[in-house]
Image: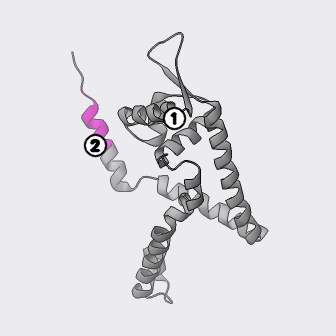
Amino acid sequence: MLKLLLRDAKYSPEVIVYQYQEVFELIFNNFKKFIFPEEWLAIDLEMSKQELLAMMLIDQHDQMIMSQLAEQINIPMSTATGIVDRLVKKGYLIRARDETDRRVVTLKLSANGKVLIESLKEKISGYLSKIYESLTEDECSYLFKIINKVIQVIQTPSKAESEAGLKQEQIHKIEIE
């Protein structure tokens, strides 16, 4: 993108660097407000963001097993276990063993957990309503397209990451006789 902008004669390298810095500062300084507004603190002051994320994921899937939760949040199983332990202790989650395979731990929201997540969903809906009310239909459409494009760009591995993944795969492929 930077190379594309540099080709455009009306943008000097100084202007482009300034724009990147401005966008970075805008995102960095407002990320917390955007993702975790202060009003969310009223939900439960003792709850971590990872705990909220875990509960939202379990709600979205109705139930999950521990390994799925760890994978979705991108954390080690030991960290997921700690998060679940705290949520069970607070009365927000129910942990149950699978009847056919006792090694599998299934997670569900408790009644208190469902109430908490519904409250959170209402707050999120309120924020989305404010956003949609302040934008035109075209702006909403563009915003949705831009967000999707940003997500695709972020999720697409760079050439260096792809090469590192190939090297890592090559390292793990060891035949044992």
Residue 11 percent across, percent down from the top left:
48, 87
Q: Which of the 4 image quadrants contains residue 129?
A: bottom right
Q: Which residue is mark 1?
A: 90
Q: Residue at x 50, y 84 (%)?
A: 8
Residue at coordinates 36% horizontally, 32% vertically from top-left?
78
Q: If the image is split into quadrants, where does the C terminus sit?
A: top left
| Residue type marked 1 | Lys
Amino acid under label 2? Answer: Lys
Q: Is residue 112 left or right of residue 77?
A: right
Percent x, y of residue 128: 69, 60
Q: 23 and 80: which one is in front?
A: 80
Q: Which residues are magenta?
A: 166-174
The residue where tag 2 is placed is 167
Considering the numbered disc 2 on the image, is that residue within a helix, a strand or a loop?
helix
Look at the numbered discs 2 and 1 and tell me whether their residues touch, using CB distance below 8 Å.
no
Residue at position x 65%, y 61% in the image: 145
> Of circles 2 and 1, which is in front?
1
